[in-house]
Amino acid sequence: MAFDIEMIRKVYKKYPEAVEAARKATGKPLTLSEKILYTHLWNGNAGTAFTRGEDYVDFAPDRVAMQDATAQMALLQFMQAGKSKVAVPSTAHADHLILAKLGADKDLQESLNTNNEVFNFLSSVCNKYGIGFWKPGAGIIHQVVLENYAFPGGMMIGTDSHTVNAGGLGMVAIGVGGADAVDVMAGMPWELKFPKLIGIKLTGKLSGWASAKDVILKVAGILTVKGGTGAIVEYFGEGAQSLSATGKGTICNMGAEVGATTSTFGYDESIERYLRSTDRDDVADAANKIKEHLTGDAEVYENPEQYFDEVIEVNLSDLTPHLNGPFTPDLATPVAEMKEKAVKNDWPLDVEWALIGSCTNSSYEDLTRAASIVEDAVSKGLKPKATLGINPGSEQVRFTAERDGLMDSFNKFESTKIFTNACGPCIGQWDREGAEKQEKNTIVHSFNRNFAKRADGNPNTHAFVGSPEMVAAIAISGRLDFNPITDTLTNENGEQVKLAEPFGMELPSQGFAVEDNGYQAPAEDGSGIEVVVNPESNRLQLLTPFTPWDGANITGAKLLIKAEGKCTTDHISMAGPWLKYRGHLDNISNNCLIGAVNAFGGNTNAVVSQLDGNTDEVPNVARGYKAAGITSVVVGDHNYGEGSSREHAAMEPRHLGVMAVIVKSFARIHETNLKKQGMLGLTFANESDYDLIKEDDIFNFTDLNSFSDGKQLTLEVIHANGTTEKIMLNHTYNEAQIDWFKAGSALNLIRRQNA
Ligand code: MIC
Ligand code: SF4
C-alpha cells in the first residue's frame, strides 16, 4: 500500500471538476502541466486564466521532501514558525552527508560516527513535527520519492533542485529553497510565477546504445543551461510512452540542468507498471479512474504549436549516445564525434574513474543495463582500464539488484567499488585518492552536474556526463573517445572484440524486495519530544532572525565582489567538505563566494578590502565590512545562482552583511531564495552597466522608499575619482515579496503572523 493514500484519493476526487473549471477559465484544451497547476490552486477552482510568465499564483502543493543538507536549514527555520506539526505530508532523507571512500559498509559506519549530531537532530525534529525520516543508507531522496511518494497528477515541492525527478511519474515537482518548504509545511500558500510551457514531442523508439539519458543530454545541448528558465517542459508523443518510468525520471531530473521549473510526462502504461511493481496498486487503480485528466488533452498534443510557448521534436530512433561536458552539463557531444573534439580541446583521453549512480541514474533498470555491459566484457576476456564506482539509488534497488545477481556482475571486475545508497561523489562526498595533487584528468559519470571541482574538489578534473551503459563501456576501454558502436578492444588473448549492445530490465521480473528500507515513521503526538541543539556545536546553530529594513535608503555600500562568468551555487556556497556546516550559518558563511571569479584580477577568493586596501578572502572582507557597519553588494553575470536550491547561497551573504545582489540575470530558485531572506535581488536594466562597476565604487540606493511592484530602482554609483553614474535596476518583486524585504525575511513575517 502507498503512503498517504487518503491524501492522493482526495486530490483525485477534486480533479474532474477542477480541470473542467480550468478549461472554462482558459477557454481552450489543456496541457498536462496546466491541469496539475490549476487543480492545485490555493483558492480552489479556477475563475480566471493566468498569464504564463507573468502572474504570481498561490498554489497548494500536496507534499514536501527535504534532504539532509538542506533540511537542516529548512527545519531550523520551521522551528521558528510557531507550528506544532507539518500541514502536509513531508519527509526528510539522509543522503548527502555520506562520504564515499572504501565501500558501502565502512563508509556508512564512518558517516554515522562523524554526522551523528546532525542525523540525531534531523531524526528528532522529524519525529516531533510529524515528518517521515529516511535514515542514512535508505537511499537518495529522489529515487526514494519515486519509489514511494510520487503520484501522477500530484504537486510537490522539495528542498533540492532535482525534486523535478518525480515528473517521471507525471507530477509537477519543483525544487525550492528551505524557506519555501517552510511556507507549505506551515500551512500557507506557496507562490510561483505561472510558468511558460515548452512541449517536447518524442517520436520513434530508442535502440542500441541510445538511452533515456541521451534524450536529455541532447535536449540540454539544444536548450543550454538557461533555455528552460521559467518554463515547465512537458514531454509527449509515442516516443514518450515507449520510455520506462525511471527513464522518464532521468529526463525530468536533468531538466534542472536547463533551468526548467520542472518537467513532466502524462500518465501512461509504463507509469502504471512502475506503480504496481513498487507496491502501489492502490495509486494505479485510483489514477486509472481519472486517467484522461492525468495527461494533456488530445487536441493539445495534435497541434502543440498552438498551446505551448515553444515546441521541440526529438526522434528517439535517430538518437545516438552522448557525453556532455566538461565543466557544464549542456556541452553535448555525440560519442561518435568525441575523438575529434577531445583532441581539439585538449581534454585528457585517459579515464581513471567511471561512476554510476546519483538520483538521475540509479534505478534498477540503469543497473541492469550497465551490468549487461560488464557481463559481456567479462565473457569476452576484457578487463576494465578505469575503476567502476557504483552508488545504488535506494536500499530497495540495492537489495533487489543483489538478489538478482547484478552486484555479482559488477564485482567480477576486481577493482569495482560499491558505495552507499547515497549521493556520494555526485556532491563531492568522495575521498578520491590523489585529488589533492590537482592533476589534469578525466572522469565519466552518469550524474547530472559536472561543474568544476564538484565531484572530487580538483579544479582540473574534467567530468563528462553519460548514460550508465556508456559509463560502463568507458570503464572497460579507459578512453573518453571510445565509441562502442564502431570501436574494438583488445582482450586478454590479444583478440579484437566488440562490446555487445546493452540490454536491461525495466523492472525486476520477481518484483522489488527489501528487508529494511530505512524508514522511520514520526510519533503520532510529538509535543513531548524535545529538540536539543548544543550551543557549543560547530555543526548546528539555532537561527537569529535577520534585522528588518530600517526604512532608509541603503547608502555608502561597498562592493564585496564583482563575479565574472559562471557563478553557480557551487561557486557561491561550495558543497563537498562544506556540507558538514549546512546547519550552522556562521560557520558555513566562511565559504561564501569563495569559488566566484573576481572580475578584477581573475582570481577566486581574493578581493581587495576597501577598508585597508589589502587583498583577503571574500568571507573575511565581508566580515570586515559588517564589523565596520558598512553594507556590501555583490555584482554578477548571467544566470547567477544556477544549479542547486541551497538557500545557504542567499543566507550566507545576508549573514555577512550583503544587502543587494545585482546581476545580468538570475536562476529562478536562487532569485527566490534571495527574496525570501530579505535581500535585494536585482538585474541591470541595461546589461552593459555591469562594465561600469569598479572595484572601489560606493553604492547608494536613492528610491528604496518607493520600492514597488513593476517600478525600477535607481542606484547611484560613485567612482573613486568622484564621478557618478546613475544605474537603473529591474526587479521581479511583487507587493508581498517587498514585504519580506521590509520584514527582514519571509520567515519574520510568518513568525509575526503566528505570534
Ligand atoms: C545538488 O545536486 O547540487 C544538491 C546538493 O542536491 C543540491 C542541494 C544542496 O545544495 O544541498 C540541489 O541540487 O538542490
Ligand atoms: Fe544527490 Fe547528486 Fe541528486 Fe543532488 S544531484 S540529490 S547531490 S545525487
Image (spheres, rainbow, N blue to C red):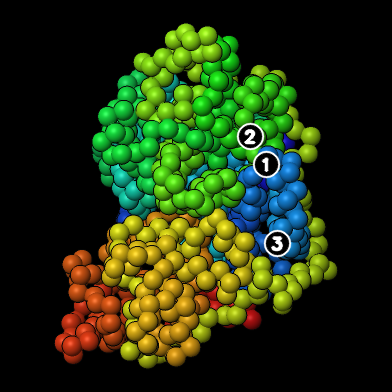
| Mark 3 residue type | Val
Above or below, 374 against 190 in this view is above
Q: Is mark 1 within 8 Å of ligand 2?
A: no
**Number of marks in picture:** 3
Q: Tell me the residue that label 3 is attached to.
A: 118
At horizontal 37% and vertical 87% (from top left) the residue drawn is 612
For label 2, the SS is: strand
Residue 697 image-quadrant placement: bottom left
Q: Residues within 10 Å of mark 1 (few under 14, many from 20)?
A: some
Residue at disc 3, secondary structure: helix
Question: Amino acid type of disc 2?
Answer: Lys
Pick whichever of labels 1 and 3 is earlier in the sequence.
1
Is residue 236 visible to the viewer in this orientation of the structure? Answer: no
Q: Which residue: 43% across, 41% down? A: 441
Q: Is residue 651 above or below residue 724?
A: above
Task: Decide which of tag 2 and tag 1 comes sooner along the chain.
Answer: 1
Which percent across, then down, holds residue 501? 47, 15
Q: Are marks 2 and 3 in contact (CB under 8 Å)?
A: no
Assess whether mark 3 and mark 1 are in contact (beta carbons under 8 angstroms). no
The residue singled out by tag 2 in the image is 417
| Disc sitting over residue 102 in the figure | 1
Tell us which disc is closer to us: 2 or 3.
2
Looking at the rendered image, the disc whose residue lies closer to the viewer, 1 or 3, is 1
Which quarter of the rendering shows the N terminus? top right
User: Looking at the image, can residue 103 be seen?
Assistant: yes
Residue 354 in the image: above or below residue 208: below
Distance from the alpha carbon under mark 2 to that under mark 1? 7 Å
Secondary structure, mark 1, is loop
Residue under the point 47% across and 69% down: 592
The picture places residue 243, in percent across and down from the top left corner, at: 47, 26
Q: Nearer the viewer, residue 63 or 700?
A: 700
Q: Earlier in the sequence, mark 2 or mark 3?
A: 3
